[in-house]
Structure formats: C-alpha cells, structure tokens
Image (cartoon, grey):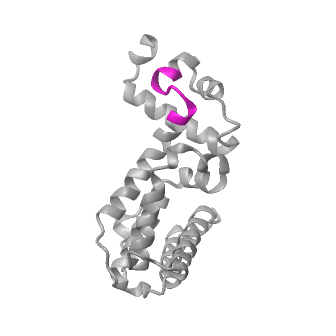
C-alpha cells in the first residue's frame, strides 16, 4: 500500500477506484464485474482494493452515495408547494441530478442486480418524498403517483437514451416541458436556467 500512497493520496485512490468500478459495472453489469477485474484494471492487488472497500457492496454504496446525497438535498431544500412554478423547478433540479450522474443513472436504469442491492435502500424514502413534492400533496393517490412515475421515467429515457448527435440543450428543454406536462403543470412557469447546466 505504501507504494501507491506516496504517489496518490488515499482520497485520490478512492476516486480512481470508483471511476474504474463504475465504468466496468456499466459495461459488464454489477454481478459480472469481480473485484479481481477492478483491481487488475487499476493496476494493483485485491488486497489494496480491500484496504479501501471491504466488499463489492461497500464499493457500490460509495459509487451511489453522491447521487443519493444530491437527491436528499433536492427534496430537503424544497417545501411542499402546490404551485406549478415551484414544482417545475423541482423537475428542473431532478434533470440536473440525472445529468450530473449520467453514467450511474444508466447503470441504475439498466441493471436489475444493482437495483436489488442494499446500497440503494436510502433512496426509497427520498423518492417517496420526491413523489409527494411533485404531486403537490403528502398523500398522492394512484393517479398522482402514476403521473410522477411517467414524468421521472420520461426524464430518464430522454436524457439517458438521447442520440449522441442530439442537441443536449434541446433534449433537456424538451424533457423538462414534457415532464411538467405529464404532471399537469405549466412548464413555461419554470424558466430555462442555462447557466447551471453541465456541458
């Protein structure tokens, strides 16, 4: 381990591990990606990997943690509101979240093995809260919950399945408009905040 740490700090090594692990999981799937393969791609031993992450589930938890933290921030900083503008702003924030964590979101969307892991346990109550905020009520009924699922699912498909040749700003704006309409909102109430977008 000393051989690695004199070139990179522990935090830098962890960042590199998470990047390589996410790339491999995205390419091969969670179940098919072994810690041995991750170690080999990083150029060090399994023992060195275990120094940072004891299990593959610990590794997955670290990969998803930033996205869960962003989702927690989105739902905790927002007060329940029935107004179209405020709810469209939540949609806008969720689009930012998906865009910021695009590779991870593709894995979560496509890999059932990941969705079943305990690392995602903290996400369930956050999505429940997001559903309440987007529906504008603490007790959304079946129709309201369905609208939210349609809106969020549409965002995922629009952003994660976009053609590489598509204009990203058009994809984003169309996803925002369509998701707000699915919720029965008026998307024109939420201005396009281009300055906050990721490239």
Q: Quadrant of residue 78?
A: bottom left
Question: Which residues fall within the magenta stretch?
Answer: 49-58
Residue occupying the point 57% across, 75% down: 150
Say whether residue 50 is magenta.
yes
180 in relation to 99, above or below: below
* Residue 152 in view of the camera: yes
Q: Quadrant of residue 5?
A: top left
Say whether residue 133 is magenta.
no
Percent of width and height locating residue 156: 57, 65
Residue occupying the point 31% across, 75% down: 80
Residue occupying the point 54% across, 50% down: 104
- Direction from residue 198 to residue 170 in the image, left or right: right
Percent of width and height locating residue 92: 41, 71
Percent of width and height locating residue 142: 55, 79
Percent of width and height locating residue 69: 38, 51
**Which of 21 and 30 lies nearest the eye of the viewer?**
30
Which of the image's four quarters has the C terminus?
Answer: bottom left
**Which of 138 and 157 lies nearest the eye of the viewer?**
138
Predominant secondary structure, magenta span: helix
């Amino acid at each position: 381990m000393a051989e690695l740490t004199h070139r990179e700090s522990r935090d830098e090594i962890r960042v590199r591990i998470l990047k390589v692990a996410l790339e491999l999981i995205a390419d091969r799937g969670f179940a098919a990606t072994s810690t041995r393969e991750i170690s080999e791609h990083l150029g060090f031993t399994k023992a060195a990997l275990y120094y940072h992450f004891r299990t593959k589930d610990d590794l997955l938890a670290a990969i998803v943690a930033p996205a869960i933290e962003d989702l927690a921030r989105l739902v905790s900083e927002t007060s329940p509101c029935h107004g179209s503008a405020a709810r469209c702003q939540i949609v806008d924030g969720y689009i930012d979240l998906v865009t910021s964590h695009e590779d991870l979101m593709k894995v979560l969307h496509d890999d059932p093995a990941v969705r079943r892991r305990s690392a995602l346990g903290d996400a369930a109550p956050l999505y429940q809260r997001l559903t309440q905020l987007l529906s504008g009520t603490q007790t959304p009924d079946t129709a309201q919950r369905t609208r939210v699922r349609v809106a969020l699912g549409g965002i995922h498909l629009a952003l994660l399945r976009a053609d590489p040749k598509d204009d990203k700003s058009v994809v984003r704006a169309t996803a925002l408009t369509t998701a707000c309409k699915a919720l029965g909102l008026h998307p024109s109430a939420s201005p396009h905040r281009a300055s906050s977008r990721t490239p």
